[in-house]
Amino acid sequence: MRLRDHTIALTTIVRREVRRFLRIWMQTLLPPAITMTLYFIIFGNLIGSRIGEMGGYDYMEYIVPGLIMMAVITNSYGNVVSSFYSTKFQRNIEELLVSPVPNFIILTGFVIGGMARGLLVGLIVTCLSLFFTQLQVHNLGVMVSVVLLTSVLFSLGGFINAIYANSFDDIAVVPTFILTPLTYLGGVFYSISLLPEFWQKVSLINPILYMVNTFRYGILGVSDINVGFAFGIILLFIVGLYTYALYLLRIGKGIRH
Amino acid sequence: MTQISTELATETTASGAAASAGEAIPKALSIRGLTKVYDNGFEALKGIDLEVEQGDFFALLGPNGAGKSTTLGIVSSLVNKSGGEVRIFGHDVTRDPVAAKKLLGVVPQEFNFNQFEKVGDIVTTQGGYYGLSPKVARERADHYLQQLGLWDKREQQARMLSGGMKRRLMIARALIHEPKLLILDEPTAGVDIELRRSMWAFLQQINSQGTTIILTTHYLEEAESLCRNIAIIDRGEIRANTSKRELLARLHRETFVLDVAPPLTSVPRVEGYPLELSGDHTLIVDVEKEQGLNSLFQQLADLEIKVVSMRNKTNRLEELFVQLVENNLQ
């Protein structure tokens, strides 16, 4: 299969993925917009006004980068896990398996689909945040690259979750019991410098902490961790998960008998 | 002509050149020593060999669980094989999957499209997977949807279609890249007789245009009407693989039903033919193949019994199929 065919196949998968989440926008785009607006009102305005400053910034300013990142993470993951699982469930994964589309194009197509939803929701949340605070950009390159890489990473995570899932319950387990706690404990609402030393060290094994703080650095210029190290960790995870997802596709885990 | 068509034409020319140079023309499908053992230890295929010539209309028959769908699943890359080799027009599906898959179209037994997508989108999206540009994919989708009577449904969600329409949708989707080999797994299951016959006509048309067709079916009448060559698979082994004519020649006896006049009150005495009276207008007779029917008609005419109409009591292929599978069980 040549480059032209690869490109057409990839854009076909991406177009189908985007069409899917736009078709069901009431389930995919509206809920995060409402949830995040509530966060802004309750945590940012009502409670935040009593908290005062965090990391040298208004509490509202401090949590906005974390909330944007939280939206990107959950929606990138959620898009791929639900889309790929329903593709398995309805057996229309067979449309791809009988075709000459190579595995890396299938994987890349679903990942770009996840990124598209994650980034679109991130943009919606960013626009909503402007009703509550003024955003500055400390380092545009860091801000854009970390949000892109984060959406890639969690799209890959969603893909692997979907491959292993045998029921709709299985696609809810990881987001509910792993992703949400890690996100809440990943420095979205607080600086880890507030924690006792032991818990600060425990927090460092949470990969989401690195993404939230790097994004916050891109916007505010403050971070609990070293930004270069954070990029290294994110890239390492991406390479690891991409390789593993390709391996699962090659052996046909969950999709071929 | 599109890129895919150009490539297919190039490959066809290449195979023609190979033939003229004295090399064998590759089979549309060549299976050698194919085995499949599922994770639970069930041995679905026990080393089958199968060849389908280019341009053939081939039936793969067998009872439920015989290995038909497993075989076709491996050919179409939906099932991992345990051993053996599968080639499509000479391209190994494991070592050269891209070339092999480009030449293959698959219509599965179960509906396997996104029920919430529009009919037109399902077909054009499949074209994209084969490298067709959106414009070409849309043109071809329109063509096949028109041919299969689905064009006015192209903007509807697939879940709104009837069962027969969904089957035709899967055929349109399988043809979007104009494959040289089309595999249909139970294509007319649950389809009414009128629609089934229109689908037969469509399949015969594309076969006459050069597409090799392999189908599995439970309607043995379908295989007898459409196919030139037939393989019967049972318990993971090929029991018969020959032309339909040769297979049917194995039947030594046929049962005929004769509608007669005037009404009969007893079985007429006819020498050499065991007759059975069913009602007062119908005679049932078993006829040995070498025996022929002339003497029967002559004797009935002598008794002033008129044969108004005649038909086979059972489908011939069905009878043979039952014989082969029963022999296997014994």
Image: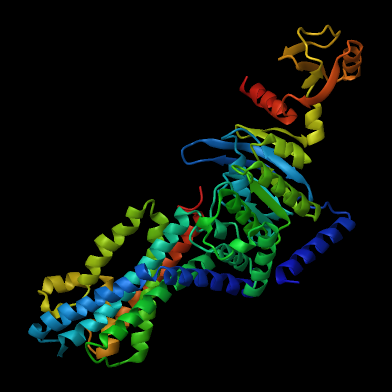
Q: Tell me: B296 left or right of B186.
A: right
Answer left or right for A44 relative to B255: left
Along the viewing direction, whichever of A79 and B298 lies nearer the viewer = B298
Relative height, residue A66 to residue B222 (above, below): below
Residue B277 position, x and y percent, is 74, 12
Quadrant of the image containing the N terminus of chain B: bottom right
The x and y percentages for residue B313 are 73, 24
The C terminus of chain B is located in which quarter? top right
Camera-nearest residue between A239 and A146 = A146
The structure residue drawn at horizontal position 60% and vertical position 38%, both measured from the top left corner, is: B67
* Residue A20: % across, % down: 45, 68
Q: How many marks?
A: 0
Nearer to the camera, A230 or B124: B124
Q: Position of residue B103 (x, y in %)?
A: 70, 58
Corner quadrant of residue B255: top right
Q: Could you tell me which residue is drawn at 80 percent across and 18 percent down?
A: B260
Which residue is rendered at x = 12% and y = 71% of the image?
A198
Is B244 on the left-hand or right-hand side of B109? right
Q: Relative to residue A28, is residue B201 depicted above or below? A: above
- In the rendered image, is residue B75 in sight? yes
Q: Residue furthest left?
A: A50
> Where is B298 relative to A83, above or below?
above
